[in-house]
Image (cartoon, rainbow, N blue to C red):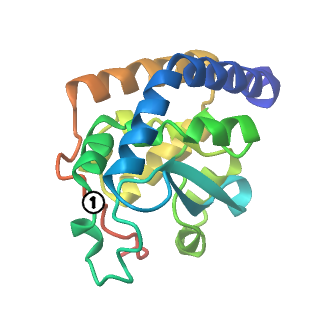
Amino acid sequence: MLYKKILKRMFDVLFAISILLIFLPVIVFISAIIYFESQGSIFYINNRAGKDGKSFKMIKFRTMIHDFKDKGIDENEAITKFGLFLRKTSLDEIPEFLNILIGDMSVVGPRPLLTKYVSRYNEKHFMRLSVKPGITGLAQVSGRNSLSWEDKFDIDVEYVDNISLLGDLKIIFLTIKVILYRDNIDSSGKHMEEFKGYK
């Protein structure tokens, strides 16, 4: 309980600062590539559902062509070559550590999804919004893209009911393993099918 209410936030801030400092040269390099590869902002900012379903602006590296919708380009066809690399390696997620410092996210927690999904959760799955969303989570190391929406939400609720320092450290370790060995990662870089509710 102490970890969940107090120490988890301290851990998040220290971890986020460490990652941002360690990856600073990588951040600068990625920013330069995006800037010169295609016109538009370096970052992609999107409204997501945070704790208690409140909307916040999640920051990621931009991986798609600027204004692709206005240009009539399909979403999955708008991913740039470098953007595809960023998605495959999860490097597009690095700016989310800024969201952690701001206080909108945690290192470990249910992944932040679109705000329109909030009204589509059942009572049980709404519990995934009782904590801050995370850069990684139990669902991401338990099958990732191979799981159905319902299975992911069940695992998210399981995480919420059993938050602990040891559990978070284990998830971080397994996340590194998933990224390095590319376990259950969709190599196409395409978006997951939209969650439209329950069958």
Question: Residue under circle 1?
Answer: 79
Inspect the image, locate mark 1, and give the three-letter code of the amino acid beneath it: Ile
Total marks in image: 1
Q: Is residue 169 left or right of residue 35?
A: right
Q: Give whichever of 109, 181 is nearer the camera.
A: 181
Q: Give whichever of 18, 175 is nearer the camera.
A: 18
Identify the residue at image location x=53%, y=24%.
24
Say which quadrant the C terminus sits in: bottom left
Identify the residue at image location x=67%, y=26%.
12
Percent coordinates x, y for residue 121 in the rendering: 54, 68
Residue 89 figure quarter:
top left
In this rendering, is residue 15 above or below 135? above
Percent coordinates x, y for residue 67 in the rendering: 41, 74
Percent coordinates x, y for residue 119 in the rendering: 60, 75
Say which quadrant the N terminus sits in: top right
Percent coordinates x, y for residue 122 in the rendering: 55, 68
Q: Is residue 99 left or right of residue 142?
A: right
Q: Secondary structure at mark 1?
A: loop
Work out whether residue 47 can be spotted. Answer: yes
Q: Is residue 143 left or right of residue 50?
A: left
